[in-house]
């Protein structure tokens, strides 16, 4: 049935349709609605299992992985500073090879502290061993939670998965969502066959032992990497089955009007739908534009991206993140798989949407114009932060107050 | 696509209003997106909510910068620059304003060339809590594509968890607003997105490198929060009856969460109305019940009347 749901409600529905047994939780804006809704359902008996409030995200993630190691189905969620607080365990638990799903609601990191969306939080988890799904709509949120469980629990993979949605722009935004029925969801995602993941108090297991000497360490680390790579193939089959059952395709790489495009936008997250709108307007104006959007960031769909972008004349990577001292993270990642490829496009870098800063239609059009110029000049412009003179004027006003130029309040009185 | 922005204060039902309107459009067969924008939640602070409705899937997101309709629940927000009520309002936009006065006066006062529709205020309670629902009802009629039953069904759906009394009260208010703007039914029109051929190039700049003292998010001046007149968030005002005050000299001032009550040398309390947010905690804790709650609008009207 189609109904209006926020991204947060869609995430909670994903956990409900997956019949999560255990949800360790800790509140943080803009994620809290997810655990509030789940708590309500556990309370009313609509969900059977247990939701436990932990005293921090670090403990929450430890509890999630420990529960997953007993073979039950675990769901948890956090955001921003919470994800960072859990970072030690975030890197530790993938090595346990016990699957579960973590939803992250993207929010900019301090300093300065903020609330709105930005991908530096989730990208800090990039190299942790979690599989990463990135959503652009509320529909994708519920679908991705189901897909993430299937992929994480696949015997060839057995890694935890992270599903990312943008704060505010998805978390608090209602859109029509076609919710799978409980029966259809259960047919797609049967009960977890833990196959040997069965830690019990009476049957103890030493999880993630210490090794000394790089050789054993190399073996274990690289095995996780191989499992993540294997997840790419497994994802193809799982996404195909999902499409067959529900009529919605969620490929590792979404291509929107990009097959015959000469220039393309490349981005992840909710703002990507704005890029789709811009593509439609540019097409109406006779400009062959398209959008290429990786939904799966880990494992990185390198071959699919190479295919999707081969023969494009120029591509603008719009990063809603900033690797301080380097630039856009997605730009660097894409460059690494396009380097040396025949027919590789020119690659331009834009930083936009930091801390939820809007990206206007006019800015997409201007980026397209710069790509066209770059094709003619055979050279891309230097990396650009999307930031206008008007924004700097506003900043100057705030700085004037902060600098105390108006004097102390008592002096004024 | 219809692009509708609702403005009001936290607590006036702006988010609820946007959801009623969103569900009503959805029930009428539209694709819908609705979203509140409120940063850090604060009762009484300016907030907005955004409703988009179209016949095709909606891919725009975030703040509506070119609204077809702005619905303003609380006209006192016009004096709060940060509320940005009139952002992007042009000759093609409709302004729906809940309040007093006639449309022509508001058009002149706000220097607007587009349509202004005034929704007469409907008593204190309706204003304080049901403004969002009233504006949703009016907006539904202005669009002219939502029937009464569709509006009623949307309210029932959105308020289901609050029970039958709240649903009935809200429905009555929203329907009254729906009827009140009947002469303007259909005045709200869908607009097309801007074409990629004629757009103003963004005024991008290269951000200059500045010294860390300037470029770090530090505030060097003391007590800058005094600059933020949080008293503007208030929908209810506490008023002290000094004849009843027993000069305890600590309860209201200590329990005020915003330190907006100071005690004078004669042990009588004084409320800083520039910064009192109107939480009414002082009203509920005063032992001799010497503080009463007054609707802010009524308090201001009284002040205006008393002014020379």
Image: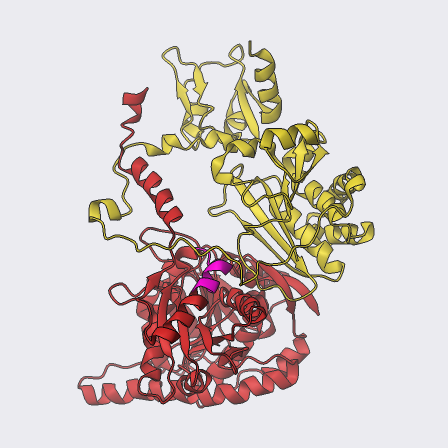
Q: A330 or B10, which lies in front?
A: A330
The quarter of the picture where residue A79 lies is bottom left
- Tell me if B180 is positioned left or right of A374 in this view: right
Residue A413 location in percent, x, y? 32, 19
Name of the residue lying farthest toward the front: A376
Residue B246 location in percent, x, y? 48, 14
Residue A393 location in percent, x, y? 36, 43
Q: Is residue B73 visible?
A: yes
| Image position of A296 with respect to B14: above or below | below
The structure residue drawn at horizontal position 66% and vertical position 60%, both measured from the top left corner, is B32
Q: How is the image coloured?
A: by chain
| Image position of B176 with respect to A255: above or below | above
Q: Is residue A294 visible?
A: no
The structure residue drawn at horizontal position 71% and vertical position 41%, both measured from the top left corner, is B134
Q: A63 or B164, which lies in front?
A: B164
Q: Which residues are magenta?
A: A357-366
- Tell me if B143 is positioned left or right of B14 in this view: right
Tell me the shade of chain A. red
Q: A103 or A376, which lies in front?
A: A376
The structure residue drawn at horizontal position 27% and vertical position 32%, both measured from the top left corner, is A405
Which chain is rendered yellow in the image? B
The quarter of the picture where residue A385 lies is bottom left
Query: Quadrant of the image for the N terminus of chain A?
Result: bottom right
Residue A254 location in percent, x, y? 51, 78
Residue B201 colored in magenta in the image: no
Q: A348 or A159, which lies in front?
A: A348
Dominant SS of magenta comes to: helix
């Amino acid at each position: 049935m189609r109904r209006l749901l926020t991204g947060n409600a869609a995430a909670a529905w994903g956990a409900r349709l997956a019949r999560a047994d255990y949800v360790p939780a800790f509140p943080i804006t803009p994620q809290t609605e997810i655990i509030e809704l789940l708590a309500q359902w556990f309370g009313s008996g609509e969900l059977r299992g247990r939701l436990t409030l932990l005293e921090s995200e670090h403990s929450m993630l430890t509890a999630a992985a420990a529960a997953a190691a007993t073979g039950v189905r675990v769901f948890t969620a956090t955001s921003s500073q919470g994800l960072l607080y859990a970072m030690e365990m975030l890197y530790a638990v993938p090595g346990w090879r016990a699957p579960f799903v973590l939803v992250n609601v993207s929010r900019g990191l301090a300093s300065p502290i903020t609330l709105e969306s930005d991908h530096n939080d989730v990208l800090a988890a990039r190299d942790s061993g979690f599989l990463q799904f990135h959503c652009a709509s509320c529909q994708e949120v519920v679908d991705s939670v189901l897909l993430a469980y299937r992929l994480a629990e696949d015997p060839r993979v057995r890694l935890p998965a992270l599903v990312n949605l943008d704060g505010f722009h998805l978390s608090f935004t209602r859109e029509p969502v076609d919710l799978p029925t409980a029966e259809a969801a259960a047919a797609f995602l049967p009960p977890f066959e833990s196959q040997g993941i069965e830690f019990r108090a009476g049957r103890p297991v030493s999880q993630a032992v210490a090794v000394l000497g790089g050789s054993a360490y190399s073996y274990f680390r690289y095995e996780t990497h191989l499992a993540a790579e294997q997840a790419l193939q497994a994802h193809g089959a799982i996404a195909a089955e999902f499409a067959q059952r529900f009529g919605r395709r969620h490929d590792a790489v979404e291509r929107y009007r990009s097959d015959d495009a000469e220039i393309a936008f490349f981005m992840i997250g909710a703002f990507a739908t704005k890029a789709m709108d811009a593509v439609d307007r540019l097409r109406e104006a006779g400009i062959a534009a398209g959008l290429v959007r990786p939904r799966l960031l880990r494992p990185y769909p390198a071959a699919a991206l190479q295919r999707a972008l081969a023969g494009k004349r120029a591509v603008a990577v719009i990063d809603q993140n900033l690797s301080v001292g380097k630039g856009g993270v997605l730009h660097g990642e894409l460059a690494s798989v396009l380097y040396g490829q025949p027919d590789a496009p020119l690659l331009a870098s834009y930083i936009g949407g930091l801390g939820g800063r809007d990206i206007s239609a006019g800015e997409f059009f201007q980026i397209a114009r710069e790509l066209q110029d770059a094709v003619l000049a055979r050279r891309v412009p230097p990396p650009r932060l999307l930031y206008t003179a008007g924004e700097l004027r506003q900043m100057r006003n705030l700085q004037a107050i902060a600098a105390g130029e108006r004097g102390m309040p008592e002096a004024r009185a | 696509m219809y692009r509708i922005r609702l403005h009001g204060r936290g607590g006036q039902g702006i988010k609820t209003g946007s959801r009623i309107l969103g569900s009503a459009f959805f029930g009428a067969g539209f694709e819908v997106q609705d979203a509140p924008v409120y940063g850090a939640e604060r009762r009484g602070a300016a907030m907005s909510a955004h409703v988009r409705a179209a016949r095709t899937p909606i891919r725009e997101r975030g703040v509506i910068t070119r609204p077809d309709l702005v619905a303003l629940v609380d006209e006192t927000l016009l004096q709060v620059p940060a509320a940005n009520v009139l952002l992007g309002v042009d000759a093609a936009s409709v302004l729906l304003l809940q309040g007093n006065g006639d449309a022509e006066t508001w058009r002149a006062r706000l220097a607007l060339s587009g349509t202004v529709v005034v929704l007469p205020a409907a008593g204190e309670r309706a204003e304080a809590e049901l403004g969002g629902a009233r504006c949703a009802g009016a907006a539904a009629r202005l669009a002219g594509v939502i029937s009464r039953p569709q509006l009623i069904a949307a309210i029932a759906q959105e308020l289901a968890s609050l029970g039958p009394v709240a649903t009935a009260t809200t429905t009555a208010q929203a329907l009254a607003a729906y009827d009140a703007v009947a002469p303007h039914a259909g005045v709200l029109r869908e607009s097309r997105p801007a074409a990629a051929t004629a757009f103003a190039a963004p005024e991008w700049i290269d951000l200059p490198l500045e010294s860390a003292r300037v470029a770090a998010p530090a505030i060097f001046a003391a007590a800058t929060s005094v600059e933020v007149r949080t008293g503007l968030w208030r929908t209810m005002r506490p008023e002290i009856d000094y004849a009843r005050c027993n000069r305890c000299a600590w309860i209201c001032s200590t329990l005020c969460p915003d330190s907006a009550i100071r005690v004078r040398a004669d042990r009588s309390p004084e409320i800083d109305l520039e910064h009192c947010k109107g939480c009414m905690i002082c009203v509920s804790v005063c032992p001799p019940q010497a503080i009463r709650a007054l609707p802010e609008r009524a308090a201001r009207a009284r002040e205006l009347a008393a002014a020379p």
